[in-house]
Image: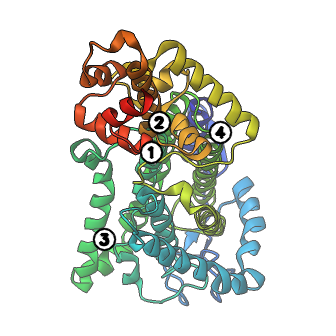
Amino acid sequence: MAKFILPILTLLLLALLVPGDDIHNSHDHFKIQRTTTYRCPPCGCAHDETDFHEKGYCPFCNMPLVAVNEGASGSIDNFVSPLFKDGLLGAFYPKLIYPLFVGGILFAVFLMISIKHGKSINIYLTSIILVIALYGFKNQLYGVQNGITNRHDALFIPISFILLIGPLIYLFTKSSVLQNFKWERKRTIWHFIPAVVIFCMYSILLIAPKAISDGFMSSPFEVSFSHIEQLFAIIIGFWYLNRSYTVVENTDKLDPWLFSWMKRFHIGMATFLGLWGLQMILNYWLYDMEVATLTYNLLWISIAAIIVWISIEVALRPQYFIFNKLHPTTPRSWTDQEIATYKMRLENVMMEQKLYTDPNLNLEKLATQLDTNSKYLSSILNNAIGKSFYEYVTQYRIEEVKQLLKSPKSRNYTIEAMANQAGFKSKSSFNTAFKKHTQMTPKEYIKAEQ
């Protein structure tokens, strides 16, 4: 995935470095020609097509006026702007996009509080839905077409955690793919520091005196702050996507459904970040980054689409996304041929090598002998054969003890010694397992066989 991500990031950075105006080379330096015409961003207000000759604020919506570029970027501006006027798109937004953002927030909260028998939907995937929905909702409050409120301090509500999108993608991937994944606070908490910084910044501005917040809104720093947040979210997101892809690639023989889902998930998130980067390029090229979320309709539609997509995946197959269940492998349907093949392979390994006689045999060791991974083997045992690893191995150990009890060569051995030879670690565990499988104690079994 690195071979795709690195070129994308390179193009994004280059595009942000190349001005959108016509550039003319004069001797050894560049001269940038700018116009003196200004226009309200295409936010949908009554003056979004009015030309102003002085820089300032739109008298209708009070948004900062931006320079209208000449040349190629100006031509594109004239083509793009009409696409975002009021009309069909204006009617489409309040009736669909806003409810989807609110629905995404409510759905994520519902999943977070729906814990049954110690099991819950993967918290990292749930957080991805929540973070994306919150960011989309926050940016609809003020300063966009059909904004929900006309209060500019709504921009400071501290619900923007979009810098968590990269870390959450990475943690979700690890928690889904790695059998031994554990939350390690000291090693994981630093992933959340950038989002905490943004949260503190917005919180301070929200409770600050009105003069300070108004001053922040009228300064270039307000727009720059939003752009920095977006740019870091995209770059960090791609970096974490690359790490997530590496985790999947380095995990041998994943369950086919899990591998397919991880592939779809990573492609979907990469597309989302790529479209966001494209919007930033257009913003810079057309308007010199003078508006924080200029005509980001494509981004808002992408966010809505991701919320719907992931929510449908979770709603239709919730068992695939259980985070802390005993066997976190993705269940699947096994054909009769697959079941027969793996049963044969398991029986051959157990009978020929007698792996069950190893008292320290575990799922990982058995999976290694079968040239597979523990999650895949666990899925086979639990969902295809219908036994846990312990139950499967115990049946072989019981049969071994039964053969030893019948053998004249073993008459000089104690029952406990036979149990240890078969792989049981203790006499008590052997007695419990033997009684469960044979409905008799070892001594009763000996008498019954005589």
Estimate the x, y position of residue 68 in percent, counting from the top left.
64, 66
Question: Quick check: marks 1 and 2 in contact, CB under 8 Å?
Answer: yes
Mark 4, residue position: 256
Residue 50 in view, yes or no: no
* Disc with the residue nearer the chain's start (3 vs 4): 3
Residue ranking furthest to the top: 409
* Front tag of 3 and 1: 1
Mark 3, residue position: 202
Side of 418 relative to 403 (left or right): left
Instruction: Report the quarter where the N terminus lies.
Output: top right
Mark 1, residue position: 170
Q: Quick one: SS at disc 2? A: helix
Residue at 65% from the left image edge and 68% from the top image edge: 301
Question: Quick check: marks 3 and 1 in contact, CB under 8 Å?
Answer: no
Task: Give the Cα separation between the discs numbered 1 and 4.
Answer: 20 Å
Instruction: Report the quarter where the C terminus lies.
Output: top left
Task: Give the Cα separation between the discs numbered 4 and 2.
Answer: 20 Å
Residue at 66% from the left image edge and 65% from the top image edge: 298
* Disc with the residue nearer the chain's start (4 vs 2): 2
Task: Give the Cα separation between the discs numbered 3 and 2.
Answer: 29 Å
Residue at 48% from the left image edge and 89% from the top image edge: 149
Label drawn at residue 243: 2
Question: Quick check: marks 3 and 4 in contact, CB under 8 Å?
Answer: no
Binning the other alpha carbons within 10 Å of mark 1 as few (below 14), some (14 to 19) or many (20 upward) gives: many
Say what amino acid the circle numbered 1 marks.
Answer: Tyr
Say what amino acid the circle numbered 3 marks.
Answer: Tyr
* Disc with the residue nearer the chain's start (1 vs 4): 1
Question: Quick check: marks 3 and 2 in contact, CB under 8 Å?
Answer: no
* Front tag of 3 and 4: 4
Side of 127 relative to 28 (left or right): left
